[in-house]
Amino acid sequence: MKLISHGQMRAAFARQLSDMYGREVPAYLTLVETAHEVNENVLQQAGAAAERFGSIDRVTAERHGAIRVGTPDELQQVSRVFSALGMRPVGFYDLREAASRAVPVVSTAFRPVEAGELAFNPFRVFTSMLTTSDRRFFDKDLRQRLENFLAARRLFPPELLRLADEAALAGGLPEERAKRFIHLAVQAFALSAEPIDKAWYETLERISAVAADIGGVTSTHINHLTPRVLDIDDLYRRMTDRGITMIDAIQGPPRWSGPDVLLRQTSFRALAEPRRLRLEDGTVTAGALRVRFGEVEARGIALTRTGRKHYDELMALADAEAAGAAPKERAEVARTLWEREFPATERELAARGLGFFTYRPAGDRVPDGRRPDADLADLIDHGWVHAVPIVYEDFLPRSAAGIFQSNLTGEGTKDDESAAAVYDAGRLADAMRQEVLDPFALYEEQQARSLADVAAALGLPEI
Ligand code: OOG
Ligand code: NI
């Protein structure tokens, strides 16, 4: 029987999730519409250059979502659902340390890993797990109550998990079952109409609004869905013109004259959504909670470990130089630093080993009597190879913390006297019984494969 592939299911899931989220959060539709306008505009002005980091079809369909779960078991179930969609856990982010406000979660991102799958549909989901055993946030009593509450809820119906496992095993699902799987998966991330225990929610909210959003309710929900845009500064202006209040800064590298690297993101503050609240006497009233928001992002070249180190150092320098300054001034300080310190061309990023590229032998090279050398900078400079940037497919812990924080109203509480519980990639991998992949290793492999092909084609030893 013909199977609907993981990639086809992922694309359908992303589309249907987007439809649902648009119905739930109309401001998201404004964001998508504005993103389309911006992308159209860039495409018209820049032509082919606009597609340097992916085809316009890919970029137009591209979204990332975010979800939050409470326990290792829940994370394991999430990983089964995403396996069926051809998405693997990549990267480990410790938001507990990256945020100044209380954000008691650690995260990974589920995404496709192969270039062909990413080009087909790059849908990814930033997935956070509550760190219930971190004593800095939850004392013994609260941890126990929290774990009891979480153990009693069920995020995913057994039928969904059964279909997920079947898809993972078979490499896809027959059409009817694929449709059923996608329907159930989308529903699992809808905002629930179940009444929320107000006192319990508020108990957790005093620790952190994120803890309340995760452990104060009986289901999970898609927390935001982020379109990709080709000019995020233009989008920021257009949203502001439309009367939507954005957070005060664009996260990530500054706008500058050199190549786009990594990831730039911005968001608008969570909107009040009607939720039903159960009071202590059992009555249910209409209330409102602000947890879901809108975010948009622009993506650039993936940096190597060395490139990333350089990036992190420049960010720290910008912070130090702009300490106490308003966001606009900080952006200006960062821009000046970048213009002075960061490689100004793709060629320099490639030759200095700071950015990831795929290489192929140049078919159009005019012979000049030279022999190629197994040296990358030399091959680039003498026209032996063409370099195509590898797009950054992951997230930035600091930006993620900024996005989380911009939506928290209170500081929350964190006891700095207690020791942090150890959560690392290995602990998430154990929970999921699945390796957490290292993003740098994925980009490295892709680049190395292309260089091996170049070496073979040019008759060179290893480059
Ligand atoms: C996730 C926040 C992080 C991003 O794009 O960095 C994130 C959340 O709010 O659950 O989505
Ligand atoms: Ni996000």
Image (cartoon, rainbow, N blue to C red):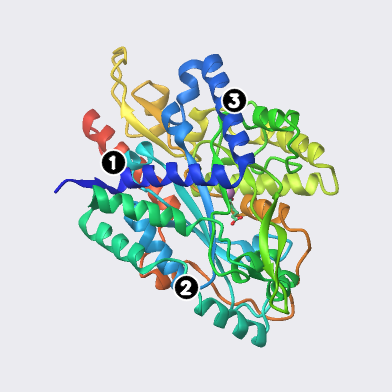
Q: Nearer the viewer, residue 197 or 346?
A: 197
Dot 1 beta carbon under 8 Å from ligand 1: no
Task: Please provide percent x and percent y for residue 448.
Answer: 33, 43
Circle 2 residue: 72
Q: Closer to the N terminus: mark 2 or mark 1?
A: 2
| Of the image marks 2 and 3, the number of the one nearer the N terminus | 3
- Reading the image, the residue beneath label 3 is 38
Question: Residue 92 at x, y = what percent?
Answer: 50, 60
Nearer to me, 19 or 261: 19
Residue 167 pos. (x, y %):
26, 57
The disc labelled 1 sits on which kind of residue? Glu
In the picture, measured across the screen, residue 229 lies left or right of residue 328, that is left
Q: Kindly identify the residue that appears in the image at 41 percent across and 56 percent down.
A: 185
Q: Which residue is at a point 56% across and 75% down the rendered structure image?
A: 422
Q: Quadrant of the C terminus?
A: top left
Q: Quadrant of residue 134?
A: bottom right
Instruction: Give the mark toward the camera: 2 or 1.
Output: 2
Query: In the rendering, at what x and y percent does residue 120 appear?
Result: 35, 37
Tell me the element at label 3: helix
Q: Are marks 2 and 1 in contact (CB under 8 Å)?
A: no
Q: Residue furthest bottom?
A: 141
Q: Are marks 1 and 3 in contact (CB under 8 Å)?
A: no
Answer above or below: position of 394 versus 365: below
- Which residue was labeled with disc 1? 462
Q: Is mark 3 within 8 Å of ligand 2?
A: no
Classify 10 Å Cα crowding around label 1: few (below 14), some (14-19), many (20 and above): few
Q: Nearer the viewer, residue 229 or 148?
A: 148
Can see residue 88? no
Disc 3: CA contacts within 10 A as few (<14), some (14-19) or many (>=20): many
